[in-house]
Image: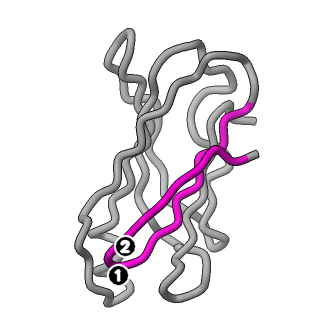
Amino acid sequence: MSAITTHVLDTALGRPARGVPVRLSRTAPDQAVLAEAQTDDDGRIADLGPDEAPPGTYELRFDVAAYAEATGQACFFPEVTIAFAVTDERHHHVPLLLSPFAYSTYRGS
């Protein structure tokens, strides 16, 4: 199982956001793209990146513009980038709640 996972919920449409392109990178101490994938029918990417994530700063980049175009929605934020710190060996789940003019995130379980 991936050490880092995500899912995207489209709060404007009230459903999972299917087909959102996502890129996982490690930004510190080095710059490295670890994985790229798209959310599934449930808005999730369960197998994103490595089975282990050493301590450091990571980044998830969500291509919101591609999703908005595919769903015919307006898009104020063409991409959302979430930087987060991995400090231990626990699983890290980083959800994104998305609408055409806002987004939010939190540390999931």
Q: Position of residue 87 (x, y in %)?
A: 62, 16
Tell which of 50 and 4 is nearer to you. Answer: 4
Per the rendering, the mark at residue 70 is 1
Q: Residue at x 48, y 85 (%)?
A: 12
Q: How many marks?
A: 2
Position of the C terminus by quadrant = top right
| Other-residue count near label 1 (Cα within 10 Å), few / some / many at <14 / 14–19 / ≥20 | few
Query: The magenta stretch spans which residues?
Result: 91-108
The reply, left or right, for residue 45 in relation to residue 75 is right
Q: Position of residue 41 (x, y in %)?
A: 63, 73
The reply, left or right, for residue 50 in relation to residue 67 is right
SS for tag 1? helix
The reply, left or right, for residue 33 in relation to residue 97 is left
Q: Is residue 82 above or below residue 97?
A: above
Q: Residue at x 59, y 86 (%)?
A: 14
SS for tag 2? helix
Tell which of 44 and 83 is nearer to you. Answer: 83
Q: Quadrant of residue 20?
A: bottom left
Q: Residue at x 53, y 73 (%)?
A: 18
Question: Which residue is label 2 attached to?
Answer: 67
Residue 34 shown in magenta: no
Q: Position of residue 103 (x, y in %)?
A: 42, 65
